[in-house]
Amino acid sequence: MIDPPDSSGTRKLRRVLTLNDLILYGIIVIQPVAPMPIFGVVSQQARGHVVTTVLLAMIAMLFTAISYGRMARVYPSAGSAYTYVGNALHPGLGYLTGWSITMDYLLNPIICTIWCSKATQNFIPAVPYRVFVCGYVLLFTLLNLRGVETSAQFNRWMVAGMSVVVLIFFGYAIRYLGIQHLDAAAYLRPFYDPKTFSWTAISRGTAIAALTYIGFDGVSTLSEEVENPRRNIMLAAVLTCLITGALAGAEVYAGQLVWPDFQHYPDVDTAFVYVAGRAGGSFLFTLVNITLLVATVGSGAAAQLGAARLLFGMGRDDVIPKRFFGVLSVRGVPRNNVLFSGLLALAASLFLSYELSIELLNFGAFIAFMGVNASAFAQGGIGSRWHWKNALPPILGFAVCFYIWLNLSAMAKIVGGLWLLAGLVYGAARGSLLRRPIANPD
């Protein structure tokens, strides 16, 4: 909402969003089914301890949520990691943070394309994977070229529908487990199984499971429209992480009980669909598969448009070539950027694995999270504002995020490192980029 011009003629956003509005927004962005698509990958990496990794990842997100909230108090009109880092630490670090986030934006459509293609193969296995990749990239691109956007009201209905499906899954899972006559030890194994537990495996799984929470920081982008942002941004970020962690933990806990054998899934990337099938037969298999497919199609189209808008913002500010990336079509769509991100998704989806794509996204996300924690520490350590109670959350947040980041695969760190190196070289060539943060695309 926008207020009428004030006495100076400046229009300002109206502060009408409540704490509940922010939490609902955070849950909509993350989605109630967030841990389901990555269940199989995390299960194999963590050797059957998915629920443990989801809860450990939540700890990192909670400390980081506090840091986002504190930075929102200092920069209530900003709401982006690269703005926080660029102002609190150094413009060059802000630029590299923005460059990392750019990789995340470009990877999101790739992840959605891969998963949608795999999920559709569950229904039509005779059609080659590459055909579905081409089809979904074309679908996302055409939707965005036509300027089709999902309304907030539609997103609310989608979240409501997903929530109903989650409840249905819980119902079938409870019924299935009720006839299995499991012993007490079986109910504890999803948290700790002495036969398979390994901190190395847990750490690797946590580095992937963190994707469950990606998007919680979106509440900080609404700082200018929130009642009492100094209080509500932090509360909303923390509560969004807690609610997500509780729901995600319950989903994967039930999933592990239904399918405890983490070594044998018909398809690792869509394993949760098969878990649902075991609990509720073909009906639940089809329902969960379609629900996740529809949700991921919506996310994929939105992710491609988000990437195109970010590229447009960078092109408009002449961070990247303006003549290509900084133009709009007559419909007001960043057409060149939509096509560019579509071609990138097509090429990458044919060669990248689902797991590596997730790890690369987390590579960039955790650099941003570490940057925000470091910024919160620096901001809290200035003059009379310094206090150990203010310093402890960002220190712990940075340490946990850094530990998770270190446990990404070597390939993810190599590819992500090359991306950062390319950004550093490009920034150095464009001199001024390392002296000012990337402009906020919003």
Image (cartoon, grey):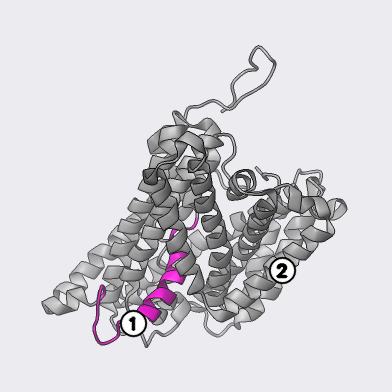
Task: Please say if 130 is above or below 17.
Answer: below
Task: Please say if 404 is above or below 323.
Answer: below
Q: Is residue 206 left or right of residue 376?
A: left
The main secondary structure of the magenta stretch is: helix
Q: Nearer the viewer, residue 195 or 116?
A: 195
Q: Is residue 130 left or right of residue 164?
A: right
Image point 48% across, 46% down: which residue? 68
Any magenta on residue 27? Answer: no
Q: Position of residue 174 (x, y in %)?
A: 20, 68
| Residue 198: mark in rendering | 1
| Residue 435: mark in rendering | none
Q: Position of residue 49 (x, y in %)?
A: 32, 76
Q: Position of residue 221 (x, y in %)?
A: 55, 42
In space, the residues marked 2 and 1 are separated at their CA atoms by 33 Å
**Res 31 seen here:** no
Q: Residue furthest right?
A: 323
**Res 41 seen here:** yes
Mark 2 or 1, nearer chain start:
1
The quarter of the picture where residue 135 lies is bottom right
Image point 76% across, 61% down: which residue? 339
Q: Position of residue 291 (x, y in %)?
A: 43, 62
| Residue 421: mark in rendering | 2
- Tag 2: amino acid: Leu
Which residues lie in the magenta part? 190-214
Image point 25% across, 76% down: which residue? 192
Q: Tell me the crowding category of disc 2: few under 14, some 14 to 19, or many 20 or more residues within 10 angstroms, Cα based.
A: few
